[in-house]
Image: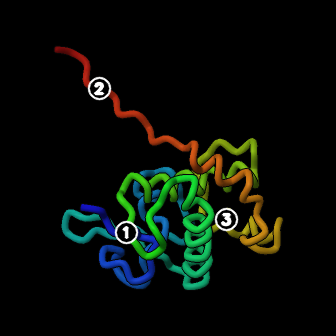
Amino acid sequence: MAAQDDTTPGAACCGGPAACVFTKAVLARAAGCECARREALGERELVSCASPVAHTNCRTLAALLRERATFALRLPPHGAPLVHAKALQLQCGGLRALQAALQPDAGDVPDVHRLVGLAHERWGSLLDAPWGEIVPALAAWQPRRRHRPCGP
């Protein structure tokens, strides 16, 4: 069964209207955000956004990432849920690719809010970002390999 896509507005598993759009990337420690607030709900960890403006900007970025990478990642049509691995690739790979386009020499974990602000400064709009270089970098992103335990 496919998992709900956290970037889809109104997704059942997103944790409410203030849920961080890039929750998967933040929880995987592949991204950070100065607006992210972590909360524990039983055994579950939730990430919410403290800024309505940042939340809107992130929703725009997530929608553009999905739209522009649909063909490259062979994603289902808009509105259809994504499997966890594809959602993770879209979020983590998309943020890494955006960071590489904005700051090629930056090696640290991208700060989502800061990246969106830099993108607006540099290109004026996320629509004007160099998607021709962002999408291939996004598609090339691979998750970290799990370490196998030593011994028999």
Badge 1 marks a residue whose secondary structure is loop
Q: Could you say which disc has been placed on residue 148 in the image? A: 2
Q: Which one is earlier in the sequence, the residue at label 1 or at label 3?
A: 1
- Neighbours of disc 1 within 10 Å: few (<14), some (14-19), many (20+): many
Q: Residues within 10 Å of mark 3 (few under 14, many from 20)?
A: some
Secondary element type, mark 3: helix
Report x, y in % for residue 12. Answer: 31, 78
x 68%, y 53%: residue: 134
Query: Is the Cβ of the residue at disc 2 closer than 8 Å to that at disc 3?
Result: no
Q: How many marks?
A: 3
Q: Secondary structure at mark 2?
A: loop
Residue drawn where x is 75% and y is 45% of the image: 104
Q: CA distance from mark 2 to mark 1?
A: 31 Å
Q: Which residue is mark 3?
A: 114
Q: CA distance from mark 1 to mark 3?
A: 28 Å
Q: Which residue is mark 1?
A: 81
Residue 115 shown left or right of residue 48 in the figure: right
Reading the chain from its start, which is encountered first: label 2 or label 3? 3
Residue 143, percent from left and from top: 45, 42
Disc with the residue nearer the chain's start (2 vs 1): 1
- Name the outermost residue toward the top: 152
- Which amino acid does the dot numbered 3 rest on? Arg
